[in-house]
Image (spheres, rainbow, N blue to C red):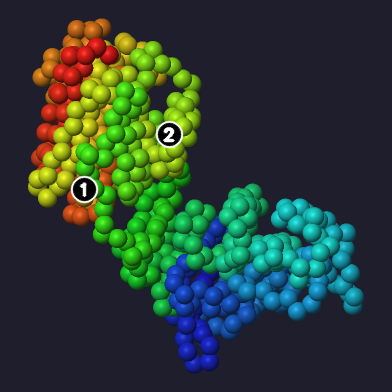
Amino acid sequence: MIEVQNVSGGYEEKPIVVHVDFSVSKGEFFGVVGPNGCGKTTLFKMMSGVLPLWSGTVSIDSRTIDQYDRKSLARKVATLPQIQQSYFTYSVDETVMMGRYAYQSGLFKQPSAEDEQVVERILHQMGLTQMRHLPITELSGGERQRVYLAQALSQEPDVLLLDEPTNHLDFSYQKQLLDELKQLTLTDELTVVSIFHDLNIASLYCDRLLLMEEGSIKKMGTPDAVMQKELLEGVYQSTIDVYANPSVASPQMNVMPGYLSSASSELSSELLQVSDEKILFQVKRPLKTFSSAVVGAGFGWYQNFVNYHVDKNFTCDAPDRFMKEKFHEWGLPEHETLAMMTAANVTNFAKRYVCENNFTLLVLVTAGTSNAVDVLYGAEHGFVATPGTVNTWVFVEGELSEQAFIQAVVTATEAKTKAFTDCEITDQLTGTMATGTSTDSILIASTQTGEHVEYAGPVTALGSTIGRAVYEATVEAIKNSFQGKRV
């Protein structure tokens, strides 16, 4: 569809784009990214014929752009520059109709019935029908951007060149606009080539990305291939974190601020508040968490931690909503609070506070064993969504990798199972040794300050510390539950 071959160019005698080669297929959403001044906009001007090429060729459907006359090229390619200036008071309707000039003939170039139909469809598609008679000078920056994009779409091009199409648009309009463009690439095989500054948006919507640096191609490929931490940090000269999007198969990135404080939350058992109703642990700064909690499951950042006691016969269709209502009763901000439930008596909890191997570690366990299960025969019990009985909290002062978080879960679970074995807890249904209970829950929380920890398996310094602390706390919590009423 589009072939850019050995293209170089710039302004006066200064080269901006140097020996750029790439191709874009019909129906592809192709993104061009890179830092300011790397040549993205200059490349677009050369692709659209606005700026002459110093060398190389730009071809569309196997014809170089200089082989198209002005109207023919306008039927093939529509552009949306980064900045649009309006010097005349045209209405929205009139502005969008200007995109039809390539289809009009005659001295006065009056719009045809087909022109009217196309403009009507585009106005509706872009959500501009209600403001069609307003002068564009009265519109906000975001509204004007939508009008100019509608003008480009009214050309009914095969190729759409966009320079920062989401400029001035709020979040909802960005999504709406890009969803529509993506749909056009799928249904109408519209070819979209767009400059993006927002790498996350580019990764979400583009089939391929071209990363530019100092006028040349640094990397080209799928978002997975281009969105690489070391590559982006080198090009953007910033500390960048790249991670998997939790919902779709597109990498996402965060720019890490340079003002991060080295101060961390104190992991002191003195911060515990224990009552018959709940255990509450509060810290001054949010901790990074990985958990199977009722509220706050998965990865997150929280500073209030609740282990809430309920009756062993408690049932609830929406336990997360139930807990959030409790947060409001207690005056705990929902977005700052992680919570678990347990049928165990929370006052029988056990804790271990460890300072060794350059780690500060706080472990808390509540335990009951009446629904103990041998994992090999779990299916024979059937699934009932009951409150957790062994809830394990592990708080670490350190900077854990995601790998370390997951390994810490494995290590803590192995330690819990070892405690069940040594306490001779059996599965009441099968008579075999239990490996846990049917609804256990776990939390790993880290200050993300201090020493970096890449691994937390059982033979590592952190892992062995977690294993011993969880084992000892679980054994003590089980014994405490035997001394009280077994739950």
Residue 432 position within the rendered picture, expressed as x and y whole percent measured from the top left: 18, 11
Depicted 403 relative to depicted 99: above or below: above
Would you say the residues marked 2 and 1 are in contact, meaning their CB atoms lie under 8 Å apart?
A: no
Residue 78 position within the rendered picture, expressed as x and y whole percent measured from the top left: 67, 68
Residue at 11 percent of width and 33 percent of height: 468
Depicted 267 relative to depicted 205: above or below: above
Dot 2 amino acid type: Trp
Residue at 67 percent of width and 74 percent of height: 84
Count residues near mark 1 (Cα–Cα under 10 Å), then give few for <14, some for 14-19, many for 20+. Answer: many
Residue at 11 percent of width and 38 percent of height: 464
Q: Element under label 1?
A: strand
Q: Nearer the viewer, mark 2 or mark 1?
A: 2
Q: Which residue lies furthest to the bottom in this view?
A: 13
Dot 1 amino acid type: Glu
Q: Mark 2 points at which residue?
A: 330
The span from disc 2 to disc 1 (Cα, nearest Å) is 27 Å
Residue 231 position within the rendered picture, expressed as x and y whole percent measured from the top left: 33, 65
Rendered-image quadrant of the C terminus: top left
Q: Mark 1 points at which residue?
A: 397
